[in-house]
Amino acid sequence: MTGPKSANAPDNSPLISNQGEQALRQFLPENVPLCDDITKAPLFDIDAEGNWLYLASPLPAKFAKLFASILYCIDEQHYLITPVEKLRVSVAATPLVMVDYQLLAGSSDNNINFISSIGVEYSVINTDIEVNDDGIYLALGRGLTARLGRACYYRYINEFILLES
């Protein structure tokens, strides 16, 4: 437990702030070294249905959900990035497939809460959703893109696209 600061005690807040900024700068995804062999296939794969695989074996949803929290897309290449290492991930289509959604109550800008096939939730503004001939896509941050799964796609079309026509 810390007591009140003494008048003679040095003020370390700028030092702490500066150290924090240095740590954040070091963790910029582009500054983390790649730790896998680029001549070999990536250890992790995400298939077109959004299923995560590790060494060609299915990854349990709880681990996929954990890894999704450190997934980035940089220059069209996907990586799992921690503060000390970066691993390539092969992605067949999009890394996440959305299977359900709900409108957030009282939202004036049409915020929609989407749920992925691995249980990760994302809040997206309806105007940030891209509808094209190939499907419906969401920009999620960290460079990631998700697409709507079949049932979610048709439900979204019925609720938003057909109503606008």
Image (tube, grey):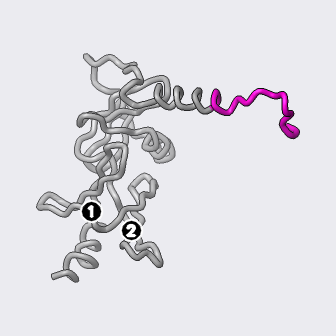
Locate residue 63, reporting x and y percent: 49, 41
* Residue range of the region highlighted in magenta in the rendering: 2-16
Residue 28 among magenta residues: no
Callout 2: 10 Å neighbours few (<14), some, many (20+)? some
Out of 15 and 93, give the one closest to the viewer. 15
Q: What is the number of the mark on residue 129? A: 1
Query: What is the count of numbered marks?
Result: 2
Quarter of the image holding residue 143? top left
Q: Is residue 89 left or right of residue 115?
A: left
> Which kind of residue does numbered mark 2 sit on?
Ile
Label 2: which residue? Answer: 112
Labels 1 and 2: the sequence-earlier one: 2
Taking 11 as reference, is 5 left or right? right
Question: In this rendering, would 38 be left or right of 122?
Answer: left
Relative side of 68 to 94, left or right? right
Q: Are marks 1 and 2 in contact (CB under 8 Å)?
A: yes
Q: Amino acid at mark 1?
A: Ile
Residue 7 belongs to magenta span: yes
Residue extending furthest front? Answer: 7
Secondary element under disc 2, as helix, strand or loop, is strand
Seen from the viewer's position, the closer of residues 116 and 18 is: 18
Q: With respect to residue 138, does 84 lie above or below?
A: above
How far, Cα to Cα, is label 1 from label 2?
10 Å
**Image spot of residue 71 (x, y percent):** 39, 39
The residue located at (32%, 48%) in the rendering is 50
Q: Quadrant of residue 116?
A: bottom left
